[in-house]
Image (cartoon, helix red, strand yellow):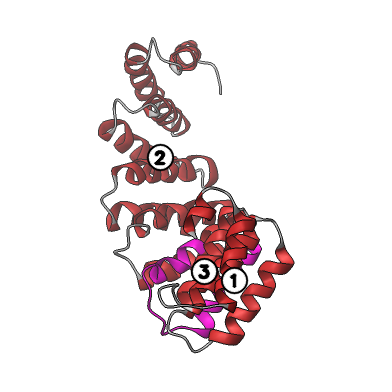
């Protein structure tokens, strides 16, 4: 039956599932799994009414079955794959609310996928709620290591810069991922520079970035904004020194031109 699905023969696959439900035989799998199969195939066929009917029947007939939450999660995944986050959310929230004691392989990541869906739908508050739930419930999950960074981005988008700074800092404290540590440090520096206008803290953050990641593709940005932060604090000589170093280091890179222009402006005494 999975072969039908994998081959894209969704109509044929659903017909097989329906036949087996009406004519069960030993070895065909559980009736619950067959009902889940009908829902999955209906989603892939783009038939929402039949998919909804299959889910309603699944809940009505197997509500007390130990695998009901697992089946609903799988159907939610299928909705996610076809970019129907609204229907996926309904099923995943149903699992959390109606089957809190259920256990299945992907149960722990339910808050995470809910957060991703809410973010894609433009609801940062609900995304934040579920990301924080994921951190509280499953801090060691493989998806959790990226959540502090994502929370920082969401809070920054909401204009809550104190929380954004907090979560960008938490990313580096709680997890060892170099990718998200690097991103969070640069984002934290940007909040200080652009949003909070705290140029002293911006110099600290950009300085750490250039020292820790001197060869990163974004290092030229760190040098540039580090110099501008020093200039805004009245340290033009230090800013020129930083830009002179950066001009030599990034002469052949994409950011080299802007750095050279900035260095020339500062040496001439012009205002930004």
Residue 91 colored magenta?
yes
Which is in the foreground here, disc 3 or disc 2? 3
* Residues at marks 3 and 2 touching, judged by CB atoms closer than 8 Å: no
User: How far across and down, in percent of the image, does residue 72 sit?
Assistant: 53, 73
The residue wearing badge 3 is 129
Say whether disc 3 or disc 2 marks the residue closer to the N-terminus: 3
**Left or right: 166 as drawn, with respect to 15:** left
- The picture quadrant where one finds residue 230 is top left
Q: Residues within 10 Å of mark 1 (few under 14, many from 20)?
A: few
Is residue 92 visible in this depiction of the protein?
Answer: no
Query: Marks 3 and 1, Cα distance to the nearest angstrom?
Result: 43 Å
The residue wearing badge 2 is 186
Element under disc 3:
helix
What's the mark number on residue 19? 1
Element under disc 1:
helix
User: How far across and down, in percent of the image, does residue 109 sit?
Assistant: 41, 66
Note whether 192 is above or below 81 in the view shown. above
Name the quadrant of the C terminus. Answer: top right
User: How far across and down, in percent of the image, does residue 22 sit?
Assistant: 59, 78
Query: Marks 1 and 2, Cα distance to the nearest angstrom?
Result: 57 Å
The residue positioned 37% from the left and 43% from the top of the image is 185
The residue positioned 43% from the left and 25% from the top of the image is 224
Say whether disc 3 or disc 1 marks the residue closer to the N-terminus: 1
């Amino acid at each position: 039956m999975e072969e039908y699905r994998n081959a894209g023969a969704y109509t044929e696959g659903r017909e097989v599932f329906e036949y087996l439900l009406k004519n069960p035989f030993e070895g065909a799998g559980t009736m619950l799994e067959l009902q889940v199969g009908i829902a999955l195939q209906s989603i892939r066929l783009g038939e929402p009414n039949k998919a909804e009917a299959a889910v309603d029947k699944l809940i009505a007939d197997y509500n007390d079955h130990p695998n009901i939450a697992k089946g609903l999660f799988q159907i939610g995944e299928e909705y996610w794959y076809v970019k129907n986050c609204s229907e996926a959310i309904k099923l995943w929230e149903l699992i959390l609310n109606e089957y809190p004691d259920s256990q299945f392989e992907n149960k722990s990541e339910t808050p995470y996928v809910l957060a991703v869906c809410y973010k894609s739908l433009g609801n940062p508050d609900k995304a934040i709620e579920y990301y924080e739930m994921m951190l509280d419930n499953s801090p060691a999950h493989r998806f959790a290591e990226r959540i502090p960074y994502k929370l920082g981005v969401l809070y920054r988008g909401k204009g809550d810069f104190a929380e954004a700074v907090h979560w960008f800092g938490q990313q580096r404290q709680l997890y060892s991922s170099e990718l998200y540590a690097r991103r969070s440090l640069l984002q934290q520096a940007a909040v200080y520079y652009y949003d909070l206008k705290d140029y002293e803290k911006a110099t600290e953050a950009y300085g750490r970035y250039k020292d820790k990641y001197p060869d990163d593709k974004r290092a030229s940005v760190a040098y540039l904004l580090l110099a501008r932060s020093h200039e805004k604090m009245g340290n033009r000589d230090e800013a020129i020194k930083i830009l002179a170093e950066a001009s030599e280091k990034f002469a052949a890179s994409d950011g080299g031109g802007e750095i050279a222009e900035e260095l020339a402006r500062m040496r001439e005494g012009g205002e930004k």
